[in-house]
Image: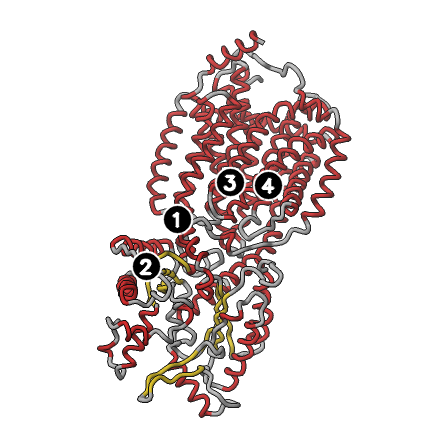
């Protein structure tokens, strides 16, 4: 029994007029092409297996931001305020004043001192000579190292140690308030000064585990060792990459099962998976040849390359099956499938690649690396899936069981496609548009709470119960100086950093900061001057103020720690210890500093933001905030231009792009509601989701337009689109969504977040192409005009 939807309208442009040149070149040289692919796969595969994890502190920060420029310019004077680690050696029972603890702490300090990558001159702990105590007596100043002289640890020496610690001012900074742990702080060298090699964060993190935690903590039931710092966090992230390989295998396995269920054909299942894996090997090999590694943020790009390959591979398998069901042999079916898909496939992949390149506008090297990596991967997919894949299928074809399944599937599901084609019906389309408008409004309302930056304490990239975050929680609970430090650099002429006007301004700024929510405490040479001035006056708290007498100030800062004043007294930092590095905390504190500087302009000295990890995070947040909207504009502009070039219609562009826009708005709303901030690792997801999601709309519209040009009614054209391309789009969206959904189980939290967001975008972009695109077409397209234009073009040619 015929379906009435099939019988409406005249038929124009039913078959291609001639084989395109590209088709003749590819299918006329199949053996040569396979040999070339085999050789290139062996070459790139050899290099792909040699690619290694890579990370760099400088590649994760916006080097062009004024804060970072200030920090890098004065880096030599801020050696222990940049990339560093803090190791807390804690006792479970008792306190640190025992012979066993002090002997172990000495060994740990020596071990840290000789770790590769440590700047040995800056290592500080109670065993290092740069940690000293000072007091004022009737005879003047007295002081010395915190560790008292002598051999062995009898009661007298332990009592002297406790007294020295209390006089050192290090309680809360290097020694816990409860005397149950001490900290060893070690600045790191980004490059080895002898070899020039960059710091290997994975090796450094493993050395911490093996030479410190395992050696001195695992076998000692009374000792716990806690480690925090950028290098340790990145090391843990790189080690977590190993689990990503397992997720990749799981994704391949799920894709295989779902493809087999979809195609009922072994060749239709294995060839797209094989071609997509080849694309991943090519991508990794090219990256290795270009000198790139896999940092913790771009390591997920091979997943996306595989996903893009599968997305386009399913379309080819589906088209092959349809052509085979019409009676064509494998060779002819592959040619006809290629002929019908290479234009929309090429445009979709170019949209992906150029869309990813828009990430290059973000001035953070790790995001630029991700953009290059993703674009190379998509460029490779253009070759593997639009050339290798159809050539392979021209030999193996679609099995008889696969052809029968396509024929029976179409007959069984015509009723379903008929029901779904009502999305293009005149009475249903307005309802869809209204729902989309409500969804857009709701999305804009809910995404008002979307924040830029971290929304959780510790390392949000890792799980809250990860070892690193547990260590960070220990530091926060037992030390008054937070690991989140904002450094304001005060620059002057040489020998002028301790002049009264400079000190008074620093004092005022510190008072403002200390009364700002989110700031635990501050420190500077002003703090030192007040303490020493009080000590000069018999410890009377009335004298715990900044003296106006320059001679008193000069005397009070003579013994200031090296970290609070540089060698020629041209720079001195103000340290603000923060409760956390959440986006709102950083914004509030940075705003206080900027407001103070704006209200108190000076000619003789400057306040410069901002070093420390909080300064780096604040700069990164600003760059991402400024780049987010610009990146989206460029992504959508690229997609729109390529769609316009392909379909030569603004109406077509709107039909394809508007569903993508709805998904972007809803994705940001979801991020706001789930407490996921826009950060280095989440910002690219928005561009990646748009780039991959546009494929659905391009394939649907290309086939939709094809049937409209045959003179079919709009609803009938959409029915045929669903029967041919629509089912492949639905399957692809669900398959890709399930594949990335497994990432939610990852021990790396940012990978879990990316998996969740990509799952949402894959599914919603598919829904938008299937549901909203035909509703928009009902209002925007003019089928009669399209047919007339096509007929005129035929006559002219």
The reply to whether discs 4 and 1 touch (Cβ–Cβ < 8 Å) is no
Residue visible at 72% across and 47% down in the picture:
46
Residue visible at 48% across and 31% down in the picture:
638
The residue singled out by tag 2 in the image is: 605
Q: Secondary structure at mark 4?
A: helix
Q: Nearer the viewer, mark 2 or mark 3?
A: 2
Coloration mode: secondary structure
The numbered dot on residue 622 is: 1
The residue singled out by tag 3 in the image is: 688
Which quadrant of the view contains residue 146?
bottom left
Q: Nearer the viewer, mark 4 or mark 2?
A: 2
Q: Is residue 491 above or below residue 548?
A: above
Residue visible at 56% across and 35% down in the picture:
731
Q: Residues within 10 Å of mark 1 (few under 14, many from 20)?
A: some
Sooner in the amino-acid sequence: mark 2 or mark 3: 2
Q: Secondary structure at mark 2?
A: loop
Q: Position of residue 29 (x, y in %)?
A: 75, 27
The numbered dot on residue 305 is: 4
Q: Nearer the viewer, mark 1 or mark 2?
A: 2
| Distance from Cα at disc 1 to Cα at disc 2 | 25 Å
| Distance from Cα at disc 4 to Cα at disc 1 | 30 Å
Sooner in the amino-acid sequence: mark 3 or mark 4: 4
Front residue (pair 559, 544): 559
Residue lying farthest front? 494
Q: Secondary structure at mark 3?
A: helix
């Amino acid at each position: 029994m015929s379906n009435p939807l099939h019988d409406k309208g005249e038929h124009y442009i039913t078959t291609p007029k001639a084989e395109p040149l590209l088709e003749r070149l590819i299918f006329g040289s199949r053996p040569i092409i396979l040999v070339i692919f085999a050789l290139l796969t062996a070459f790139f595969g050899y290099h792909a297996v040699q690619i290694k994890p890579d990370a760099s502190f400088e590649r994760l920060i916006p080097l062009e931001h004024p804060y970072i420029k200030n920090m890098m310019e004065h880096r030599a004077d801020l050696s222990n305020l940049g990339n560093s680690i803090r190791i807390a050696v804690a006792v479970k029972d008792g306190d640190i004043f025992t012979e066993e603890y002090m002997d172990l702490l000495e060994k740990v300090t020596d071990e840290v001192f000789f770790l590769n990558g440590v700047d040995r001159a800056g290592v500080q702990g109670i065993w290092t000579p740069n940690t000293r105590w000072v007091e004022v007596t009737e005879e003047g100043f007295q002081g010395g190292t915190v560790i008292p002289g002598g051999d062995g640890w009898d009661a007298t020496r332990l009592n002297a140690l406790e007294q020295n610690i209390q006089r050192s001012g290090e309680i809360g900074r290097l020694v816990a308030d409860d005397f149950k742990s001490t900290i060893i702080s070690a600045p790191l060298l980004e490059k080895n000064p002898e070899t020039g090699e960059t710091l290997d964060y994975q090796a450094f993190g493993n050395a911490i585990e093996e030479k410190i935690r395992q050696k001195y903590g695992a076998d000692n039931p009374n000792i716990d060792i806690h480690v925090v710092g950028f290098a340790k966090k990145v090391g843990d992230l790189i080690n977590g990459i190993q689990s990503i390989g397992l997720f990749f295998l799981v994704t391949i396995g799920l894709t295989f099962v779902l493809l087999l269920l979809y195609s009922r054909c072994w060749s239709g299942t294995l060839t797209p998976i094989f071609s997509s894996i080849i694309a991943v090997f090519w991508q990794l090999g090219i990256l290795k040849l270009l000198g790139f590694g896999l940092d913790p943020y771009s390591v997920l790009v091979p997943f996306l390359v595989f996903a893009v390959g599968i997305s386009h591979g399913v379309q080819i398998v589906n088209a092959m099956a349809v052509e085979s069901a019409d009676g064509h042999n494998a060779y002819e079916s592959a040619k006809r499938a290629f002929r019908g898909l290479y234009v929309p496939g090429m445009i979709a992949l170019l949209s992906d690649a150029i869309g990813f390149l828009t990430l290059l506008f973000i001035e953070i090297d790790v995001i630029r690396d991700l953009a290059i990596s993703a674009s190379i991967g998509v460029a490779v997919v253009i070759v593997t899936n639009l050339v290798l894949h159809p050539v392979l299928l021209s030999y193996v074809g679609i099995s008889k069981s696969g052809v029968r399944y396509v024929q029976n599937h179409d007959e069984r599901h015509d009723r379903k496609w008929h029901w779904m084609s009502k999305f293009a019906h005149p009475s249903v389309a307005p309802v869809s548009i209204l729902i989309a408008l409500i969804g857009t409004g709701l999305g804009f309302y809910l995404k008002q709470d979307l924040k830029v930056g971290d929304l959780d304490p510790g390392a949000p990239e890792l799980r809250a119960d990860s070892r690193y975050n547990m260590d960070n929680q220990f530091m926060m609970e037992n030390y008054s100086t937070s690991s989140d430090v904002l450094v304001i650099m005060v620059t002057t002429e040489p020998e002028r950093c301790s002049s009264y006007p400079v000190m008074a301004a620093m004092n005022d700024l510190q008072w403002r900061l200390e009364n700002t929510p989110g700031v635990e405490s501050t420190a500077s040479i002003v703090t030192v001057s007040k303490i020493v001035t009080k000590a000069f006056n018999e410890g009377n708290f009335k004298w715990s103020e900044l003296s106006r007498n320059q001679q008193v100030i000069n005397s009070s800062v003579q013994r200031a720690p090296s970290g609070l004043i540089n060698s020629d007294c041209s720079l001195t930092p103000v340290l603000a210890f923060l409760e956390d590095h959440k986006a709102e905390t950083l914004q509030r504190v940075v705003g206080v500093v900027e407001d103070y500087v704006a209200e108190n302009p000076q000619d003789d000295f400057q306040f410069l933001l901002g070093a420390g990890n909080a300064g780096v995070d604040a700069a990164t947040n600003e760059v991402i905030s400024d780049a987010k909207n610009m990146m989206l504009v460029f992504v959508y502009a690229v997609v729109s231009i390529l769609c316009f070039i392909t379909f030569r219609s603004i109406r077509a562009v709107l039909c394809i792009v508007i569903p993508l826009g709805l998904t972007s708005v809803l994705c940001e709303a979801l991020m706001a509601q789930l407490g996921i901030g826009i950060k280095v690792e989440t910002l690219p997801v928005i561009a990646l989701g748009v780039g991959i999601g546009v494929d659905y709309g391009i394939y649907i519209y290309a086939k939709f337009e094809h049937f409209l040009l045959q003179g079919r009614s709009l609803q009938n054209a959409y029915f045929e689109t669903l029967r041919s391309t629509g089912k492949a789009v639905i399957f692809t969206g669900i398959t890709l969504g399930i594949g990335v959904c497994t990432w939610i189980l990852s021990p790396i939290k940012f990978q879990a977040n990316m998996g969740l967001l990509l799952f949402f975008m894959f599914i919603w972009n598919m829904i938008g192409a299937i549901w909203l695109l035909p509703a928009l077409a009902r209002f925007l397209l003019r089928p009669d005009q399209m047919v007339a234009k096509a007929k005129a073009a035929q006559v002219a040619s």
